[in-house]
Structures are given as structure tokens and as C-alpha cells.
Image (cartoon, coloured by chain):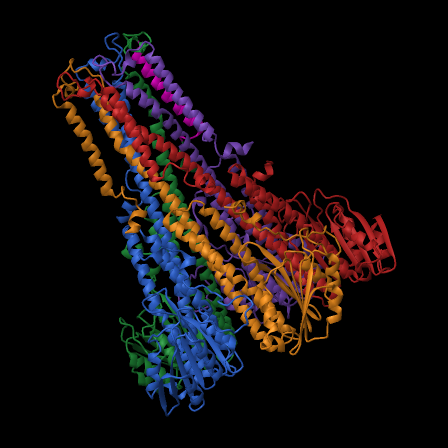
Chain colours: A orange, B blue, C green, D purple, E red
Amino acid sequence: MSKRHRRTGASMMMRRYTQRAAPGTKPGTIHIPADALPPVIRITCYDSERIEHYQDCKVELIQKLLGKHAVTWIDIVGLGDAEIVQRVGESLGLHPLAMADVVNVPQRSKVEHYRDHVFLVTQLPRLSQSSHVEQISIFAGKDFVLSWRERPSDCFDTVRARIEETGPVIRQSSSDYLLYALLDTVIDTYFPTLEDIGDRLDLLDDEVSQGAASDLVVRVHGVRHDVRLLRRIVWPLREAVEMLSKNHEWFISKETSIYLRDCHDHTVQIIDTLENYREACAELRDLYATEISNRLNEVMKVLTIIATIFIPLSFIAGVYGMNFDPEVSDLNMPELKWHWGYPITLGLMLLVAVVQLMFFRWKGWLGKTTRKQEKT
Amino acid sequence: MSKRHRRTGASMMMRRYTQRAAPGTKPGTIHIPADALPPVIRITCYDSERIEHYQDCKVELIQKLLGKHAVTWIDIVGLGDAEIVQRVGESLGLHPLAMADVVNVPQRSKVEHYRDHVFLVTQLPRLSQSSHVEQISIFAGKDFVLSWRERPSDCFDTVRARIEETGPVIRQSSSDYLLYALLDTVIDTYFPTLEDIGDRLDLLDDEVSQGAASDLVVRVHGVRHDVRLLRRIVWPLREAVEMLSKNHEWFISKETSIYLRDCHDHTVQIIDTLENYREACAELRDLYATEISNRLNEVMKVLTIIATIFIPLSFIAGVYGMNFDPEVSDLNMPELKWHWGYPITLGLMLLVAVVQLMFFRWKGWLGKTTRKQEKT
Amino acid sequence: MSKRHRRTGASMMMRRYTQRAAPGTKPGTIHIPADALPPVIRITCYDSERIEHYQDCKVELIQKLLGKHAVTWIDIVGLGDAEIVQRVGESLGLHPLAMADVVNVPQRSKVEHYRDHVFLVTQLPRLSQSSHVEQISIFAGKDFVLSWRERPSDCFDTVRARIEETGPVIRQSSSDYLLYALLDTVIDTYFPTLEDIGDRLDLLDDEVSQGAASDLVVRVHGVRHDVRLLRRIVWPLREAVEMLSKNHEWFISKETSIYLRDCHDHTVQIIDTLENYREACAELRDLYATEISNRLNEVMKVLTIIATIFIPLSFIAGVYGMNFDPEVSDLNMPELKWHWGYPITLGLMLLVAVVQLMFFRWKGWLGKTTRKQEKT
Amino acid sequence: MSKRHRRTGASMMMRRYTQRAAPGTKPGTIHIPADALPPVIRITCYDSERIEHYQDCKVELIQKLLGKHAVTWIDIVGLGDAEIVQRVGESLGLHPLAMADVVNVPQRSKVEHYRDHVFLVTQLPRLSQSSHVEQISIFAGKDFVLSWRERPSDCFDTVRARIEETGPVIRQSSSDYLLYALLDTVIDTYFPTLEDIGDRLDLLDDEVSQGAASDLVVRVHGVRHDVRLLRRIVWPLREAVEMLSKNHEWFISKETSIYLRDCHDHTVQIIDTLENYREACAELRDLYATEISNRLNEVMKVLTIIATIFIPLSFIAGVYGMNFDPEVSDLNMPELKWHWGYPITLGLMLLVAVVQLMFFRWKGWLGKTTRKQEKT
Amino acid sequence: MSKRHRRTGASMMMRRYTQRAAPGTKPGTIHIPADALPPVIRITCYDSERIEHYQDCKVELIQKLLGKHAVTWIDIVGLGDAEIVQRVGESLGLHPLAMADVVNVPQRSKVEHYRDHVFLVTQLPRLSQSSHVEQISIFAGKDFVLSWRERPSDCFDTVRARIEETGPVIRQSSSDYLLYALLDTVIDTYFPTLEDIGDRLDLLDDEVSQGAASDLVVRVHGVRHDVRLLRRIVWPLREAVEMLSKNHEWFISKETSIYLRDCHDHTVQIIDTLENYREACAELRDLYATEISNRLNEVMKVLTIIATIFIPLSFIAGVYGMNFDPEVSDLNMPELKWHWGYPITLGLMLLVAVVQLMFFRWKGWLGKTTRKQEKT
């Protein structure tokens, strides 16, 4: 159990919305995050006939390649150079406020329409680290798509592979379809993360049923945090995708719009699943709380029953421990002088204990009220 | 009580929304589920005069029959063959994304309008197994209806019987009415399931009143899960049906639209009932928790009262068990030497016990505070 | 307390939404409920000059009278004859789906606009039996109104009396005003039921304040159920009335529309009151739970205090019950041999008890923490 | 603490929405409430030049004065005469349904537009009696304003004084500005009531912090009731004012509309404050519940610790109270015969007690877990 | 821990919405708050070529400078002079109701459109005092911007510095851009406050994990209050900014509108963060409550176990403390005369204690149920 998991909501956010610049600073200023990697630029140009790849390009190449093919896809990884950010923005004619959003991580998922380009920003879960996300910004104009990620990952390799193959629809289509393809890939990345969370919930569920989990509260907290984190990303993403798919004025073709509707359905499914997980977390907590409280109550009850059984016995012993003098009066505890006095007293004690036990059993106080009968 | 019922929400979902394909895969790819049955095709063509049935057809037959009758109903059961799925889609001119949804179970209930056909997908509860659902996809075009189910069942037999009879409106109508008839059948299938859940709730209710149920928490969980499962299906279905009934541009005739409004009313009734069941579940849980806590409190109270009654008695016995020497001083427990000492002491003890009991009764602490008076 | 009241939500619904027909049956089929009464038809025809009453009419009479007066009001009680239902529907040209809703009780409150008639269905609370409702369906066309109730009651007698009098506006108006008059009567029927529930809540409130109610949880459950039942009827009714009052295209005159707005205000008031009752129920439950828990805690505290006071006393008695031999050593409990030994010991015990009591009183543990001070 | 405060929500409503007339009665019938005062009519006519006052007028005067000045303000107090109500309504041409609402107290706040007049009804809190409200109805036509209150109060005196002064805008304006002035006065009346509730909450807050309040639950209930009462009045009032300010078709001038927007802002502020009070009530209750439960737990813990300390001591005393005969065997409690036996035993007991106390202190069980450390 | 933090919601509001004037007072009256500072006026006029600063100006200067430059920015600090407020309003032609809102602190955040100026009012958090806010009102007309703050602060110094520099866009733009710049600065001021709250939550989170915080409830209350305070400011601010950015009819240029959309995004981020903090507060409270209750239960359990172990031992001691006379009968506790009687009895006691301990350990009642296992 890592230290991180012990923390509750606020600190688990990991990345708070911040304004790095002091209040009043000129809008659109580029503030590079402290741990940002140096940007690596990779360009893929294609139309239905040709396809060209350029790795580790310089910014100048963008300008040169732009407009020579149907689609120029600039894929940049790493935010660590303010100058490059600025120059890329200028070569493609992107709005400074949008460029500031690219580096000012994390942004809330959103789509923004500018005069001649569309800007989409969202967060991408990193596979197998369910509570780590990285920001991805996608710009799309008439003949280019610019995707900008924080850290290297292979998530766009399948898209690049699909462009390679001559068959698919992607090569015949314009840049709006590439935008869709990237967005679809981003959204699909959530499904393994959901699976992972689902598996963790199943595991916790089993542990609660077996009554063994003791750090469950903290682990459910962990899951709940991840669910909340994803929810806060996917809710606005859903809105953004809907806005994109409905607003096909100048950029999104009718055909691509149908594909975007499919993307939208996927975000709805993700949200549905997350809502379900959230309810499941709440139920797990309730169930666990009930379990704990039942167990403690059980302990207290058994202990109290033990005490209650012995109390009358001790009283009887106490009575015969009184020092009344049997010799002064034959009313003074003559039992003490009887031949069978002691055995009878012990028998009386046994009887009292047995009667009490039977009474408690008749009342149904002895069985483990909740758990035992459950198992039958 | 099956193992399954012991699980909470997340794992009880049984079927999570998943993307079988890796992120970035080409959209519209057909991924057959592992346990899918091989498809069996059955075709019914009819117009107001003729009716023809074809069982276990090949895919080629579809193309041949299409357009020869007013309505061609292709009813397929089983998803287990990617090639057939693709070829059926192609013969009817269906959109690849929709075909992918047919096999990618489970889908969220939805209606999608394509250029020349309507696609509706939802889940169908399997009778007598309230938490099992199967996916059903219905495509409807101008002169055909395609229904595709996961598993064989007799749920559409009544519709087929109604087509057989020459009288009904169904033979005179176009494919939109058949779409309605199938949808109506699907929605009606929910009512027995609702009845079943209602009966389970009534039973649980009785058991709580009689104070006997001990695995109730888990069984209420089971019911709640089923309610939640159905809710998550029927909510989007309601929207889909509303969309369908309001959007009668080119496909749904005015008359069929009135019938669809009736369908819509039924989904609203289902949702109403489910909301009611949900509240009833919550109340049952509350009631049960109160019951359990009252019972435990009762036990603790009685035990504490027993202890409290004996404590002063034991004290008295303790006092007369002190070894002060009555012979040294006539102030040292002269009672020990009295003729009536012992009986008086016992009487004193009895008196103390009775006084305590009367005090407790006067305070109203002896009756079972909640349950006993309830029954009067 | 009737058995019925012991049940929680699900079973208290009394009447679930059901589809009596098997899934797939032809829509619009008339299914008579098992306990339905045979229909009794009563017709009142009037215009500003004439008024005619016909009791226990046959269905044929409807056709004959229709169109001869400004308004023909057919008032039917009892649903028990499928043929009559069908023939009445046919004589007035009503839609089969609406006729099916008339007998398929209970329906959710709704208004439906057909080509030449309006169909309104809702539930009517039966006076003095707050949790019994009966269904009432009203059809209104250009020159007729058809009201169809489940059971005989006098709720429309005042309307009939108002028609009798020559003065009122009702005789000069067309069928839309009669529709309003009937709807207004139906809505007004809720107010005595609300009064009744309010009185029950007041009574419960008093009992909680006096701390006497013990079956309160169950009775609050009963009230809550009734409130929920009414809520589920009146919410959709409000929508239906609003829809009716706003949609005065061809049927509702401007003047009647103002009256319908008044109806709408009444439904809003009913809903407001029901929301208020709902909150009051929740508060009563909370208050009662607090009360119960406080009382139990009080008991436990008093008992524990009694025990705590005696424990040190018993200890002292135990010490002097030890058998150290004072004769062996003068350190061995010389008190036993003292002249004032026993009285001093008793005094010591008294002192310990008094000191403890004073300590507890100083700590404020002796007063009934919550209730006693409350009364001052 | 008055009896009234002990009641919960339902009964505290004081005034339920009721229909005094039997169901089915003719709409617009005037039903005078039982405790209504006889109406007193006061008329103020003014235009920019003249101003005339008439006190204790007869109804006939209204007709005479109407139309002779720019604005005729009829201010009536008291609802106790059905005939006067009817005749006033007729002289001004008001709708019978609106007149029925004037006397049928309480009405939900609302604005209604009739052909040539506007009808506004709301509740007015009575100063210094925060849970008493009275109904106020305002009608405004082209050249008249009719305000009708239940009981005499001085709340409109400031408006009358403002009319007296020649300077203000009110004399130059038409009747819509007078309507605004009255409405503004009504809304401003809520602020002292809010202040009063705020003060009560502050007081309760202080008492909870000092741990002294014991009837707090009931008093918080009282505040909560008042908040809820006001909320239920102001919410629909806000809507009504918004509707009025936005709907300046024929009656509200553009300039007055700006003033009404200000009124609307005030209602929003009132609602904001009430929402805040509601949350504060909930927090106070939680805090108090925590306080009570902590205190009780503290008591139980201390008592249990006392008992636990003495139990081993009593056991030791019990051991040496056993009657084993030291003379039979030198293994039989030789301690009894030792010279230091008794002191050693007492020492042993002391040691056990001290060890226990130290253990408990080390465990941190002795300090008042929550409250003491809080104060540091 | 300051006294302030001990208070709950209602009193923590610090500033309630109030109407200082008596109900019925003429609207638009200027009521100066008691503690207001005297106003200090500072004017900055600029266009793309010139820039002029005037400090500590008189009101008359406004009139003189107005219209001579592209933008005249009047920045006033302090509300303490009714005459100056009135004269400033008159020189700029501002609406009296808006001027009244400037001094009537606090106002709910809002934007109001007047004929030739826009009025925006909101609250500004004071840095490093997270629960203190001050009101800021901004008026913007065609060629002027008036900002009016309650107290001196340096929050607009960066804007003034940006105007100084000749480069930036601000000098070329019209007054709408200055309005944006000020608003952006105001909104950015929230981020450090959010950071501060986030840090406090992290601290509390750590303390809860370490189980040490005892005044946590009160401190969480404090944070929650601040969150609620900010929420109540930022929610309406978000609406206001949205309204401003969407409503660019005559005043906001298309370009500035894009910048305002950025502002709007920031308010959404602030709200998002605040919602997150709110949830985190709730979770912290839950976690703390669980912690406290677990700890207390632990104590009670250990104490009860101690008692339970000793009770049978005391009983055994009690038995051998009975005074049955072994000499009368050899059945009367012959053990007392045995050579090994006492050691055997002690052994028996030890055995009973050990058996009990083992039983409890086997049952798992001895470990700290929740916390210890957590750490492993």
C-alpha cells in the first residue's frame, strides 16, 4: 500500500488546475512546466497516393511541408521549450491562448472553434497506471493536424500503421478524419483503464465477502479517487465530442460526423461505467462499515453474555461467603453445616448458568446474528 | 443463495462495456464475442396478400428476396460468424459502425438514423432469469426489417403468429409497423421481470416484518442490482423510443407514431416502477438496519439490567463477608450474631432487587422498547 | 394498525403497472381486470336551453343522442365488459390504444391529443381511504365528454347539479368547459386527502414530542407511502394539465384556458404540500431515531453509573473479606479488631459513594442530558 | 420555549394550502376565512400635480375616482366581507378566479397576466414574528393599483410618504412604478426577518461551541422550519418577479423593468441567504449530534475505565478471601500468616492499579479524546 | 485556533446580504457602510500613442478627461463618501441602481447591461486571508472603464504596468479589452487562494492518516466554509462572464470575446476545483469520524476483554471464599483441606485466563481490528 493511497481526495488530485503566471500577467504567455521533456517533432504527410515520414524534425520543416499534401500530421511529444511552442503556433497560425493551454497542464477537456482551426484538449490515462494522466492537445485545420502530448507513448502507433496501409478510408479522407482517428484512439485508451478499475473493485468485493480485508477503506478510497479523476476528465470530453460532432459547419464532413457520433457513444459508455463504479464504491464502503460494526457488536455481545452468566454465580458464592454465625442461630445459613451443602450449592450455580444459557439461546442471542445464518 | 448474489455492484454488472479491439484499431471492425452462437437466419416476407417463410437460410437469399414483397423480415439468432455479419450488412447496405455495434455486446440502448435505415439496439431481459440480458439489434429500412438476437428464444413467435393471421393491421402496414411490433414485444418482455422483482421485494418485506431474515442485506443487494441493471437499460431506451416516435420524417408514418407513443408510455411506466423499487430497496435496508440495531441494543440492555440488579446484592454479600471480629467490639457487624440476621439479610437483598426492578419498570426500561408495543 | 401498514414501499403500491397481455399481443386489445364492476352508463345532454338526463342507458343511445345538443356527457362507472368498452369507443370514434388504457388500470396520469379528441387519464383518491385510488379516464371531443370511472362514487354529483341550475357559465359553454369542470373536481378531491395526511402527521408529531409513540416508525412509513403514492400520481398530472392549458389550438377556448391555469396552480399547491409532507416525514423519522437512541443511551448510562458506584464499594468489602490472620501479625488487617472498625468501614464506603456521585454530578453526567433540560 | 417550537415540519406549516369549498363547487366562489378582519379601504389618487387621500372609503368611491387621476391606489386591509370583495372585483373588472385567490389564503406566490390587469400574490413576513406570514395581493391595471392585505401593518406607510413628497420619480410615473414600489417594499420586509434568523443561528452556534445548549435540536428545528417556510414563499416569488420584469409587453415600461430587475436580484439574494441558513442548520445539527455522542462516549469510557481498574483488585481481594486452610498445608495461602502479608497485598493492589493507569495513559485513553485537545 | 474558526456556516459568512435602508425607502439611495475608507481616485488615460497618469484626483477631473483619449480608466479605492459616489455616477451617466450596488456590499456577482454601459460586480479574495473578500465593481462604457474597490491592494498594478509597456495588445484595443484585463486579473486572484485551501486540505489529510489531529472537525469546518464562500461567489461569476462573452452586440468585440471565453474557462476550472475540495472535505470528515469511532470502540473492546477475563477468576475465588464447614461433611469443599488445594486453584485460575485469551485470539478479537493490519 503506497503512501499515496492513504491520502484522500484533495491531495490525490495530483495535478491541480493552476495559473502559473502571477495574476494580471498578459494572457497567452507560455509557461513551461518544471518537469517538461524537450519537444520531439515527427511529421507524417499523406494523400491517397503518397506518404512521407519525417522524424525529429526542426520547426522550420512544418512551414515547408504545409500545403504540399492533403494532410500534414505533426505529432509532437514533450512541452519543454517555450520557443518551439511559440514558433509551431506561429507557423500554423494558431491562437496564442490555445498555445498557452497546450503547456498549461492540466486543462479541462474542451473543444474550441477558432476562425480556421479547431482546438481540442483532453487528458489521456497512462496504461497500467490508472491514476496518472497526461495532457493531449489536438489542433486541426483544413490541411493539417497537430497533436501534442506530454510524454512519449505508443498510443498513436496504430493510427500511423493504419495510414501506412493503402487500403483504409483514412488515406482518402481529409484532416477531419485524422482528427477523428486520433480522438477515437484517445477515447479507446480509457477502456483498459476501466477494466483495471473494474478488476480492483471485483477483488475488493471478494475480500469484503470473505470478511478479510482490513485496509479496504483506504483501497476503496483509492479506487474512488481514480473514478472521480476519470469522471472529471470524461464528462467535459463528452460535451466536447458532442459539440464537435454536431457542429460540422465548415470542417467536419457529414461522413466523419457519423464516426464522431460513435466516439460520443463511447464517452457515454465510459461515463455510464464510471457512474456504476462510483455506486459500487459507495456500496462497498457501506457493506464494509456494516461488516466492521457487526463484528464489533458481536464481540461486545459475547463478552457481555459471559459477564452476565457469571454475575449471579458470583452472587451466590458471595452469599455463602458471608460470615453469619450458624452457631448463634439455626437460621444463620444452616446450609453451611449441611452434609450436601456444598455440592447442592455448586449444583445450584450450574443450574443458574444453564438456565441463563437456555434463556439466551431461546431469545436467539447466542448465534452470530448476522454472519452465521448468512452462510447457510 | 448463489455466490453471484454475494457480489456488489461492480462485479454484478456481468457484462461491462468493453472495446475488444486494441485502442487505435480501425473503426467498424467486427469482433466476435468468445461465447457467441453460430448465426441462424430466418426470413419472413409478406404483403397484404402473400406470406412466405424461409428457415435456416443462407445469406445470399436475403439479396434475392429483398424488394419482392412489401416487407422482408430477416430474423437472425446468434452472433458467431464475422463473415456472415459482414455479408448481411453489405447486402442490406447497413453502416459498418452499426454492424460493429451488433456484435460488440453490450451496447447502451440507442437509436441511430442513417441515410436510408434506422438502427435500434437495446437489451432484452431473459424471462425467469432476471439478471441476465441479451442484446437485440433491429435495423429497419423502407422494405426490410432485420432483427438480430444473441440467443434463441421464443419472444418473437407471437409477432410471427400475428403476421400469419390475415386480419390484423400488421399485414397492411409497412416495415415501420413491424419495427414497432418488435419493439413493443421487447418492451413488454420487461413486465414479467418487473413482476418477479416485485414479488421478491414483497417476500423480503414480509421477512423483515417477521424479523426472521438474516441474509436480507445480501438479497436486497441482489434485487437492487437487478433494478439498477434494468434502469441502466430502460433509461436510454426511453429516450431512444421518444426520439423514434417524434422523428417521423421519412420513415415512421403518422399512425405508427401514435403506436410508438404507446411504447414510450410503457417505458415511462417501467422506469416509474423501477424508481419505486429502488426506493423500496433503500427502505428495506434502512428498516433492516434499524431492526438489527434495535435487537442488539435490546440484548445489551437486558444484559446490563441483569448485571445492575446483581451488583448491589453482591455488594451486600461482600459486606457480610468481611472478617470484622464481632467479638472484639459489639459494633463490628453484630448482625452476624443476630438470630434473624441471615434471613433479614436475604430479605434485604430481595427488597433491593425488587425495588430496582420496580424502578426500572417505572422508567419503562424493561419492555422491549420498540417491538413489543408495536404488535399491540 | 392493519397488516397492510406494516409493509414497505414495494408491496404498498397495491397496484403495479402491469401488462396483462402476454408480450407480443396485438396492441389495443381490451383486457378486463378481474374485479371490475359491470359498466353503468348515464348520459346528460344539454345546451343553454334544454337539459336531458338518461340513466342506465344502452350503448346504442350514445349514437342517437350525439350531435343533438351542444354537449353530450356520457358518464360511465365500471369497467367490467370488454364488448361495451369496444362499442363505446367505436360510437365516439376513439382510438383503440386509448380505449385499452381505460381498462388497463392503473395508468400513469397523462393527456393525449388525437385528431379529433383529447384523452386524459389520472387516478382519483377515494375519500377517507387515503391509500386507495381509482382510475378515471376522460375523453373530450367537439360535442361530447366521456368520463369513465372504476367504481361508483358521488364525486361528479356537484358538477351535475351545477349543470342543472340554469345560471352558471357551464351551460353556455362548450364541452371544453365541462372537461375543465370534471378535471377541477378530480383535483379538488385531493385536498381532503391531504388534510387527512396532515392530521396524521400532526398526531405523530405530538406523540413524538410526548415520547410515547412506539409504533411510530411503521406509521410514519404508512404516511410516507401515501405521500409517495399521491406524488407519483400528481406529478405527471401537473404536466398533463399544463400541456392541456397551453395547447388550446383547436379545442380549449381562451377563457377555459384561464380556468385550466387555475387547475394547474392547484396541482402545484398539491405537489408543494406533498413535498412538505415528505420532508416532515423524514424529520419525524430522524427525531424519533434520535429520541430512541437518546433514551437507550440514557438507560445504559444510568445502569453503568450504578455499576460504577458499587464497584469500589465491593472492592472495599472484598479487602476486608480477606483472611489475613490478624493474630500472626499486627499489620494483618488490624482494623478487623478495632472497636470502630466496622462502622468506619461502612462510613468509608458511604464516603466513596458520595464522592463518586458528586464527581459525576459535577461532570454533569447525572442529569438526563437531553430531555430534562429541554422541558424547562 | 413555546409549545409551537416543539412541533416538526408538517404542523409548523401553520397554514396549509386548502380548498375550503367542497370538490366540484363552482370556480371563483368567494370563501371568507373564519378569522378574517372586516375590510378597511383607503384610497390615494395622484398625478404629477395633485394628490388626494380618502380613508375608510365605501366601495362606491372606487368607481367614482377611477380614471380621474393618473394613478388610483386602493389599499385594502382585511378580508372579512365576501360582498365587498366581490364588488371591488367588479368595479375594477378583475377576474373572479383572481378575486377568489385573494381571500383563499395562503396562495403560492405567483404573477398572472389577465387581459387588462396583472395579478400578483405573495406572502409578507410579519416583522419580529419570523414564522408568521400574511398574504398580500396586488392588482395593477393601466390607471389603478389595488393592494389587499390580511391584517393592518405600517409596511406601506413609507411608500405613501414617498408619494407625498413632490420630488421623487414615483409621482411622474405610471401605475407600473407604484406596483414596483409596493413589491420592492414587500421584498425588503424579508431582510429584517433574515437578520433575525441569522442572529438566532449565531446564538445557537455559540451555544454549541460552549457545549451548553441542550434544547438545541428543537431550536434548530424551529429555525429550519422558518427557513423552509420563507424558502417556499420566496422561490416562486423569484420566478414571479422574473416573469414580471421580462414581460413588459403592454404594462411594464422599460425603465420600471430595470427597477424590477433590481427586485429580482434581491429575491435571488434572499434565496442565497436562505440556502446558506439551511446548510448552516444542517451543520449545527451534525455538530450537535457529534457533540452529544462524543460526550456520552466520554462518560461511558470513563466509567468503563473505573470498572476495569477495580476488577483485578477485587480479584486479588477475592483470592485472599478464599478459605483454604493454611494449617493443613503450608502451600495453602501462607501469605495469610506472613507478617507483611496484608501490607504487601495492599501494595500489590496499588501496583496493579498504577500499572493499569499508566497503560491507559500510554494508550492515550485517559484524556478527553476530542474536546480537551481542541481547546489548546 | 482562532475563535472565528469555531463558528459554523451562518456566522462565518462574515458578510450577510443586507438592505441597510428601511423597507420602502426610495430605490437607488446611497448608504455608505460604517467602516468604509474615504475614496481615492486614480486615472489612467491612454491610446496607442499617449499615456497619462493622474493620482489622487478630484471628481471634476473625470469630466475633463473623458473623451480625450481612446480609453479613460478611473480606478477608485474606498467607498466612504456618498457625495463622491453620486457625483462619479453622474459624470459618467451611470444608473443610480448600479451606483447603489457599488456601496451596498456584498453584492452577488452579476453583469448588468444598461443602455450605454456594462456593470459588473463581484468579490475579490484578499490574498493570504482566504476567508476575507472585498467587493469590486467595474463599469465599462465606450471610452471609459471605472473600477471601484473597497480597500487598497496591488492587484491592478500588473495591468497598469502592461498598459505602460508600448508593446502589448492592450494599448491598441478599446475599453472592452481593458474590462477583460481587469476581469482576468480578478479571476486569477482566486488561484493562489485555491492553492492555499488545497495546502490546508493536504495538511489535514496527513494529520488524519497519522491519527493525530483532534481539532480536525473544526478545521475542516473552516476549510469547508471558505470553499462554500468562494463557491457562492464564483458560481454567479461564471454565469456573468458567460453572459458577457456571448453578448457582444455593441460593446465586446469579437477578438475580446475569445479572451473572455478564456476567462470563462478559468471560472469553470475554479468551480471544478471547489467542487473537488468540497468532496474532499466531506471525505475527510467521514474518515475522521470513522477514525474516532474506531478508536473508541477499540478502547471499549479492550476494557471489556479485561473485565471478561477476570470475571470467571473472581467467581472461582468467590467459591472458595464460601464458608461451608468442611468439618461437618467431607463433601463441603474438601479442597480447602488438601495439601495442594491452593496451588491447584491458582493454577486453575491461570488456566481459565489462558484459555480465554486463546479463545479471544482465535476469534481475532485481540488485534486492533482496523488500524494495525492496515499498516502491514
Q: How many marks?
A: 0
By secondary structure, the bulk of the magenta-drawn segment is best described as: helix
Residue B210, given in percent of the width and then of the height, sits at 27, 52
Instruction: State whether residue B313 appears in this view.
Output: no
Residue A219 horizontal/vertical position (percent): 47, 49
Q: Is residue D121 above or below residue A332?
A: below
Question: Which residue lies most toward the bottom here?
Answer: B49
Name the residue rendered at 65%, 59% in the picture: E265
> Is C352 a magenta residue?
yes
Q: Position of residue B305 (x, y in %)?
A: 29, 34
Residue B242 at what x, y percent from top left?
47, 74
Answer whether residue D364 is magenta in the image. Answer: no
Q: Is residue A18 left or right of residue A281?
A: right
**What is the residue that sits farthest to the right in this orientation?**
E50
Could you say which is closer to the camera, residue A256 or residue C162?
A: A256
Residue extent of the magenta highlight? C340-366
A226, above or below D373, in the image: below
Q: Nearer the viewer, residue D249 or E195?
A: E195
Is E192 on the left-hand or right-hand side of C238? right
